DNA sequence: CGCCTTTATGCAACCAGTTGCATAAATGAG
DNA sequence: CTCATTTATGCAACTGGTTGCATAAAGGCG
């Protein structure tokens, strides 16, 4: 499970509070790992209990915002986890199940849904490419930046794949539809 | 959630028992939707309670194997679900979290893990291509087969992407390693 | 000042999927 | 025939993630 380690990573990049983490999760790390504020608060408490992080300005009186920073034990744990082997998770996609169902029960409205997905994936692709243009106009200049770039490229590659696949699927499904109406 | 509908699809293709479903899930639909026997038995019971499927030979005496078939209500539900819109699920990948962590805490053993993943993805890619060669030597000849082919192609595309990405990642991480040892 | 909205925090219940274990019938080897 | 193995079924507990709701402080407006 990645959430605790994603939080440690984000807090090492910059110590901050739960709600700020939730915001940052919607960008950067959040491209590949999402978390609701619930998960984040719950997990921060657990990480604190484990002694991996600690709250800054614990009794700052005014304002309930509690910023956390990573303790040496947390850094050590993150290092351990990062080098740990993991099996690649098998593919799992509901759309493929729907396509198999379509194959068995004949034409449905599925193609409409895929058209709308295509639009969404195109949008996300454009977003990622825009970020890439903005943040890495001349590639990456340091190890850290190279790795960040790599993760972003993964996003571009994945969205490109989805765009290609949706187009292929629409071609197949629309051809059927033509035949049906002819 | 797809499991009930994946089961309905599989049972429409051919009525069978829980354990046989578990076996078939390791192929075909299982490329994109896995399920343990536990989930399958639990879900079959639920589908029966809902009146979507029914057990054949309910009191066949010898042998506890219970084969199920889909009832009209189940077929109707599958059709309803297939045309239903679904948001594309956001990407979610632990490896990307690890790469971001690597970027922050410096070199780890991560590259070893990615090398082993590369090997596994190459293996899976070869398997899918082999299946494609065997089952679709001349493309697909019917609507149903076209859709099955499409799903298989999604597998090929996804594994190809992973292979490309692993190679890219190894290049970045290995370059760092060279620098470190130089 | 007093009120409404937004931000930050959190509990509790739920849901889908996994893990560990159990048990009964079928099969097959000695 | 009998015992060990494999196949088929299933319960219970757990885990990670989601949803719905609640509450308290901060900020802005009349």
Image (cartoon, coloured by chain):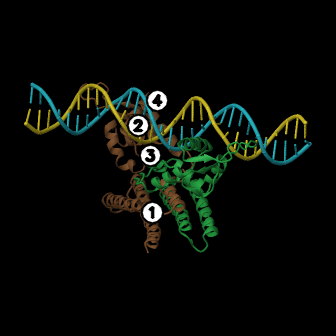
Chain colours: A green, B brown, C yellow, D cyan
Mark 3 surroundings within 10 Å by alpha-carbon count, few (fewer than 14), some (14 through 19), many (20 or more):
many
Q: Mark 1 points at which residue?
A: B161
Q: Which residue is drawn at 60% across and 59% down?
A: A124
Q: Mark 2 points at which residue?
A: B39
Q: Nearer the viewer, residue A5 or A152?
A: A5
Q: Name the residue under label 3.
A: A101
Q: Gap between marks 4 and 2, in whole Å?
A: 16 Å
Task: Compare marks 4 and 1 and give the one earlier in the sequence.
Answer: 4
Which numbered disc, 4 or 2, marks the residue closer to the eye?
A: 2
In percent of width and height, residue A22 lies at 63, 49
Pointers 2 and 3 in contact (C-beta within 8 Å): no
Report whether residue A111 is seen.
no
Relative to A97, does residue B37 appear above or below in the rendering? Answer: above
Tag 4 secondary structure: loop
Tag 1 secondary structure: helix
Q: Mark 4 points at which residue?
A: B50
Q: Which chain carries label 1?
A: B
């Amino acid at each position: 499970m990645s959430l605790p380690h994603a939080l440690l990573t984000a807090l090492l990049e910059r110590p901050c509070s739960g709600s700020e983490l939730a915001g940052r999760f919607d960008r950067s790390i959040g491209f590949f790992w999402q978390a609701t504020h619930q998960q984040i608060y719950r997990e921060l408490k657990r990480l604190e209990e484990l002694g991996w992080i600690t709250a800054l300005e614990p009794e700052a009186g005014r304002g309930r915002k509690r910023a956390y920073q990573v303790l040496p034990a947390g850094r050590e744990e993150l290092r351990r986890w990062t080098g740990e082997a993991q099996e690649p998770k098998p593919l799992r996609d509901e759309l493929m199940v729907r396509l198999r169902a379509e194959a068995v029960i004949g034409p449905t409205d599925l193609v409409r849904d895929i058209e709308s997905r295509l639009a969404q994936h195109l949008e996300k692709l454009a977003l990622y490419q825009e970020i890439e243009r903005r943040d890495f106009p001349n590639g990456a200049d340091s190890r850290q930046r190279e790795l960040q770039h790599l993760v972003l490229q993964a996003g571009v590659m994945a969205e490109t794949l989805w765009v290609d696949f949706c187009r292929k699927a629409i071609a197949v499904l629309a051809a059927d539809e033509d035949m049906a109406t002819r």
